[in-house]
Amino acid sequence: MARTEQKSAINMPFHVMLIPTLGCPGKCNYCWSSDEKSPVMSIETIKEVVEWLKDFREDSVTFTFHGGEPLLAGADFYREALPILNEGVKPKKVAFAIQTNLWKMTDEIAEIFAEYNIPIGSSLDGPKELNDFQRGEGYFENTMRGYRIAKEHGLSVRFITTFTSHSEKFRENIFHFYLENGWTLKFHPALPSLRGDEPEKWALDPEEYGKLLIYLLDKYLENMDQIEVMNIDHLCKGVFGGRGAVCTFVDCMGDVLAVGPDGSIYPCYRFVGMPEYVMGNVYDHPGIEDLAKSDAWKLMFDYKEYVDQNCKDCTHIKYCRGGCPYNAITPTNGEIKGVDPHCISYKMIFDEITKRVNEEMFGGSGLEMGFFQDPMKPSKPGIMSLMFK
């Protein structure tokens, strides 16, 4: 029988990521998700997405436009696509979001997005010189021009930073760049690039990423009244709640799906453009049972079972779940030979959070201490302060 069981790790909302194109005008050195020859999604495909979802699931859905660079689809695409998606899947509740470098943002597009109150995620790796060294000359100014247009139309914009083997050496500069601008800091480590002859050149070593996470935890606690560090919040909530707070740390299969420019359905946006991970096509209106027959779906559940078996003795398994399947599987050409390579990083930060919570609450290294300190009155801001923030 095809495996379609729902996960107990977290009750995730249903999330469909729409990839209008894998094309992108940027030339980021560590890019792993662009294709200059990629087609652009048609409105007909958007209509088929609606038809597919009518009987697929009953719960609400969030549509996130991702890429490549989704604004390459143009104003006319969004003017047509958004009402089709918003009205077409009723009575389901619908929410929208977009991840874009903002280069192609215009007043026209901003007005369309404002009508649907679409939050924007964009990317900056820090101050201009550092950002453009990693992402290409002119990137910073192009993005900030689009940012100003979006803000003029009342749109919410948040940035995500990619820490690389180069930029992690400038962690303090990057943190203060976000602090001084009053922006929320969200980040991720660079993965091996799909471009060039040195795919590992920009990738961030897992142990160095673990040290970075602990550094950012400290900086957040020192400045928690002035900045939000989203990743640290999510990591702490995972430890406290006993379940992952973001898709990296949950069994996301079936709750997150992605649709490529031609209507192909994938487990996640990261797999888009990789034929071996196609599970079906929206034009065929497949149900969950249909998707579950695909090799890609089976592989995702095989990974879940691998984690259950190989991580069962790890104290963090409930809120880690082996990390991201894409990170674990794609470097080994689709074979399951281990968990997310950032397992080292995750253990480092989860151990650190757990240790500090024990010290704050019990005055020692574990629950066996048998007495409580007042968690509301730490000597200095601690993990508990984040939870009460």
Image: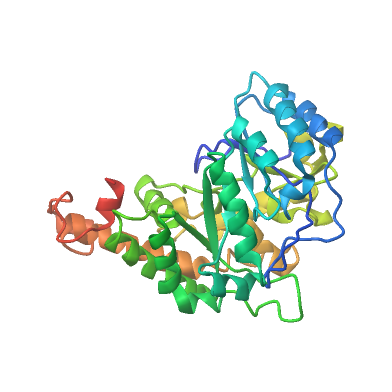
Q: Residue at x 53, y 55 (%)?
A: 159
x and y percent of residue 114 in the render? 60, 35
| Left or right: 235, with 9 as reference point | left
x and y percent of residue 92 in the render? 63, 23
- Kindly tell me whether residue 141 is visible in this rendering: yes
x and y percent of residue 72 in the render? 77, 50
Number of marks: 0
User: In front: 226, or 5?
Assistant: 226
To which quarter of the image does residue 85 belong?
Answer: top right
Colour scheme in the image?
Answer: rainbow
To which quarter of the image does residue 382 belong?
Answer: bottom left
Is residue 59 placed above or below 185 in the rendered structure?
A: above
| Left or right: 76, with 215 as reference point | right
Q: Residue at x 41, y 66 (%)?
A: 175
| Left or right: 38, with 190 as reference point | right
User: In front: 158, or 389?
Assistant: 158
| Left or right: 242, with 14 as reference point | left
Q: Residue at x 55, y 70 (%)?
A: 128
Is residue 207 placed above or below 183 in the rendered structure?
A: below
x and y percent of residue 270 in the render? 69, 55
Q: Residue at x 22, y 58 (%)?
A: 381
Dividing the image into 4 quarters, which one contains the N terminus?
top right
User: In front: 386, or 301?
Assistant: 386
- Kindly tell me whether residue 322 is visible in this rendering: no
User: In front: 373, or 61?
Assistant: 61
